[in-house]
Amino acid sequence: NAGVMQNPRHLVRRRGQEARLRCSPMKGHSHVYWYRQLPEEGLKFMVYLQKENIIDESGMPKERFSAEFPKEGPSILRIQQVVRGDSAAYFCASSPRSDLAGASSYNEQFFGPGTRLTVL
Amino acid sequence: DAKTTQPPSMDCAEGRAANLPCNHSTISGNEYVYWYRQIHSQGPQYIIHGLKNNETNEMASLIITEDRKSSTLILPHATLRDTAVYYCIVARPGTYKYIFGTGTRLKVLA
């Protein structure tokens, strides 16, 4: 059973270009979460998606960033017109069910290996 | 979700127990304590979680104080492969926005 897969593992872009980061959740998982990790910092939540729905994007910058999780295919985190401050590691996690309020038990998020974005 | 405080770094000799502390003095009654670790250049890996009782699994033990204001993750026989950043997170069971602080950078020494 393959884990969460992310590609590319490393991505280099020049300022102003677009970055597309892909995440394939674990088999059977329909919930995807994206986190960003700046150098020497902990991970910061960006967005939570279910198939074809954005559930919570409160951690995502309002401009230039977007995310989707289509019915078929991987989840995509898209960054338009990248700037040097976007350089970071971007991690995707998946879980088999929702962690929404009311759940009585822990629902582990499984993390992928990350995509390291470098903006020149 | 409650805030956590961890020492920035620790060293441990290979084969010895590594005890990683975490303070979470503002934890509320229904919040769990979770531990993850991040080995260099990899995604975070779940280790263990608990509410009030001590927990043990194949990776580690979790000791939570009676007042729940602090906890300790114990790696009973640390190996070089346990060198990583360890994150202590407290969150309600319904949350999905894990808040990772800066964690404790554990270095296991040969």
Image (cartoon, coloured by chain):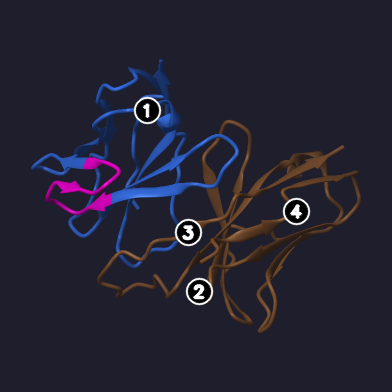
Chain identity for the colour blue used in the image: B
Q: Chain of mark 1?
A: B
Q: Nearer the viewer, mark 1 or mark 4?
A: 1
Q: Main secondary structure of the magenta part?
A: loop
**Residue carrying label 1:** B79
- Amino acid at dot 2: His
Task: State the separation of the CA atoms marked 1 and 2.
Answer: 32 Å
Q: Chain of mark 4?
A: A
Front residue (pair A64, B84): B84
Front residue (pair A38, A93): A93
Say whether residue B30 is left or right of residue A29. left
**Residue carrying label 4:** A8
SS for tag 1? loop
Task: State the separation of the CA atoms marked 2 and 3.
Answer: 10 Å
Discs 1 and 4 share one subunit: no
Callout 2 environment at 10 Å: few (<14), some (14 to 19), or many (20+)?
Answer: some
**Residue carrying label 2:** A29
Say whether residue A39 is left or right of residue A105. right
Callout 3 environment at 10 Å: few (<14), some (14 to 19), or many (20+)?
Answer: many
Tell me what hue chain A is rendered in: brown
- Amino acid at dot 1: Thr
Task: State the separation of the CA atoms marked 1 and 4.
Answer: 31 Å
The numbered mark at residue A110 is: 3
Q: Which residues are magenta?
A: B49-61
Earlier in the chain: of badge 2 and badge 4, it is: 4
- Amino acid at dot 3: Phe
Callout 1 environment at 10 Å: few (<14), some (14 to 19), or many (20+)?
Answer: some
The answer to whether marks 2 and 3 mark residues whose Cβ atoms lie closer than 8 Å is yes
Say whether residue A82 is left or right of residue A39. right
- Residue shown at 35%/53% (left/top)? B1
